[in-house]
Image (cartoon, grey):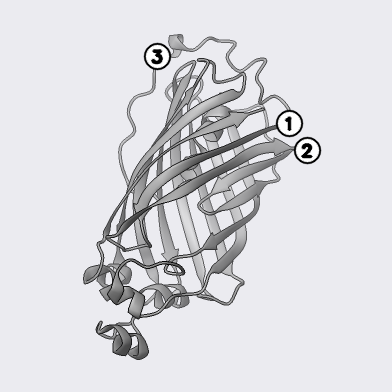
Amino acid sequence: MRIFVSSAIAAAACLAAMPAQAQTGPDPDAIPEDAAEGSVFDGDWVQVGVGVGYGPDYDGSDDYEVFPLPLIRGKLAGVDILPRPAGVALDFVPDGDGKVSYTFGPVVRVRSGRTGDIEDPVVAAAGELDTAIEVGPTAGVSYSGLLNPFDSISFSVDARWDIAGAHEGRTISPSVTYFTPVSRGAAVSLALSAEHADDKFNDYYFSVTPAQSLASGLPVYKADGGFNKVGANLIAGFDLDGNLLNGGLALFAIGGYSRIVGDAKDSPFVAQRGSADQWLGGVGVGYTF
């Protein structure tokens, strides 16, 4: 059950998170005692899906756009495939039978903020940025059976470095996720996370250089490293035949809020031309086999 919850609502990985309180879990009697037996997730499995999201044009923007939400997750030859925002991670640590499990492996993300069509003409005048490809390790731990036999809380952290020569910096993204089934055919998840970046990253995305100032009219600004974003996402998954464990089609929905913080919040790209408040919504469909 825990595996399904994190896969069917894998769009949770699509954005960052902010502190919020989880609700009490469902009545354990609502879920059969044999729910974890005979599952499509017992061996190798794959979930693919697609959805549509609505969110900011780039981090700190107050212009919103519609964008695709692709989804892939699974387990092949004992290796877990884990979704990430615009990327993917692999977990090479085998799952045990106890309540505690661990994850460790590589993670990759493509970051394309302010690389394409920029709606704000002033920000566009400052120039487009290059696409970053970030790689590094991910590690985490998960505890199950907290408020009912099938819920879980997970703690993880990704550390990534740009290898494409864009920002050439490093980010560290800690997160905590609580998820639980609410019936045999539905599950919800609350994800909380943050992003900490070094000087190179924050300077690339949030500073205004003299050349950018001359082109756009924005004041010169220097952003130092530190936390730049915190937020919260609430995600729900609904199996179309009412059984989470037999695979097939499922729907997911996501709603989220994040807040730009630190030097990033004071950047003219955010404070003058955008907003520190960032909202997200999305729906999609996935198929598990």
Residue 99 image offset from top left, x and y in percent = 58, 29
Tell me the quarter of the picture where residue 94 sits.
top right
Task: Of the two numbered discs 3 and 1 on the same chain, state the one appearing first in sequence.
Answer: 3
Q: Nearer the viewer, residue 167 or 174?
A: 167
Q: Is residue 151 left or right of residue 97?
A: left
Distance from disc 1 to disc 2, alpha carbons, whole Å, reads 7 Å
Decide: is 131 above or below 217.
above
Three-letter amino acid code of the residue under disc 2? Ala
Give the crowd class for mark 1: few <14, some 14-19, many >=20 residues within 10 Å.
some
Residue 269 image offset from top left, x and y in percent = 29, 72
User: Is residue 15 in sight in this rendering?
Assistant: no
Task: Of the two numbered discs 3 and 2 on the same chain, state the one appearing first in sequence.
Answer: 3
Q: Say which residue label 1 marks.
A: 44
- Tell me the tag on residue 27: 3
Residue at image location 65% in from the left, 43% down from the top: 81
Decide: is 61 above or below 21.
below
Residue 202 image offset from top left, x and y in percent = 40, 73
Which residue reaches farthest left? 272
Three-letter amino acid code of the residue under disc 3? Asp
Residue at image location 50% in from the left, 20% down from the top: 240
User: Is residue 16 in sight in this rendering?
Assistant: yes
Tell me the quarter of the picture where residue 217 sits.
bottom left
- Tell me the tag on residue 225: none
Task: Of the two numbered discs 1 and 2 on the same chain, state the one appearing first in sequence.
Answer: 1
Q: Say which residue label 2 marks.
A: 77
Q: Is residue 76 left or right of residue 155?
A: right
Residue at image location 45% in from the left, 22% down from the top: 186
